[in-house]
Amino acid sequence: MLISNTHSFIFFHVAKVAGISIREALMPYTQEPQRFRMRRPPRTINGKANALYEIWESVLLHATAQQTQKALPDAFNHYYKFAFVRNPWDWQISMYHFLLKQTQNTHYDLIKSFPSFRHYLEWVVSEKKPFPKGATKLQKTMLVDNKGNLMVDYIGRFENLQQDFQSVAQHLGIQANLPKRNTSNHRNYPDYYDSYTKKLVGIHFAEDIDLFEYTFD
């Protein structure tokens, strides 16, 4: 989550949807709210994952709309709120390749041991919280209230990232360009799917697919 009191906006960071690039582009216009202010702890200590870093990352980087409304009600009710989402089939491929590089992740050894994306995906759908802290299993969890209603003013799409981001920048009256950060190198997502894995995502991520109106193609 990023907040700007000078330009009256809140950006909600959905994991693996160009959030690092968007944060970097918006950072000159933002201020860290006192309510969320805490020193960034080291990611690791003596080569091991630091639990305090995971807490920091979860609370500040990936604060949900509900959490922000509760902590900063006045800003939430008056500021322009936006986020970006991604095709769930593509999102799973990106997350898979990202986690294969995260050696400090609690599940790294397990994920590395899977012989294929299919085995990884079967594990993901069977787990309540398969992703690192701060990354929700469904993208919508970051952005909806308890009744499933969207709590933001604008949803941009990863598939139309540059154009949608510039629409946001124009609305906010700022000059900002997206750098390319935290990318994963892999083939186009349809190449990884067969009929079984395609259906698996369709069933278990149906809430995202329906809310954001995605199809496999």
Image (cartoon, grey):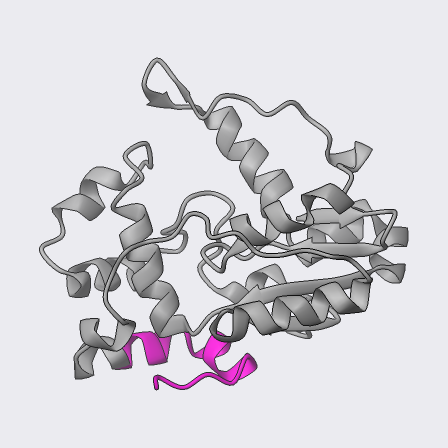
Say which residue appears at 82% left-offset and 62% top-offset.
173
| Vertical comparison of 113 with 158: above or below | above
Say which residue appears at 70% left-offset and 47% top-offset.
2
Q: Nearer the viewer, residue 115 or 167?
A: 167
Q: Main secondary structure of the magenta part?
A: helix
The answer to whether any part of residue 140 appears in the image is no
Say which residue appears at 18% left-offset and 79% top-offset.
196
| Vertical comparison of 192 with 78: above or below | below
Say left or right for 34 vs 198: right
**Magenta segment includes 202:** yes
The C terminus - image quarter: bottom left
Say left or right for 150 vs 97: right
Image coordinates for residue 205, horizontal then vertical, percent = 41, 73
Q: Nearer the viewer, residue 65 or 6?
A: 6
| Vertical comparison of 184 with 190: above or below | above
The total of numbered circles placed on residues is: 0
Image coordinates for residue 39, horizontal then vertical, percent = 65, 22
Image coordinates for residue 129, horizontal then vertical, percent = 41, 52
Q: Residue furthest top?
A: 46
Image coordinates for residue 50, horizontal then vertical, percent = 44, 24
| Vertical comparison of 83 with 52: above or below | below
Magenta stretch bounds: 199-217
Q: Residue furthest left?
A: 115
Q: Nearer the viewer, residue 16 or 23?
A: 23
Say which residue appears at 49% left-offset and 55% top-offset.
136
Say left or right for 61 vs 204: right
The answer to whether any part of residue 112 appears in the image is yes
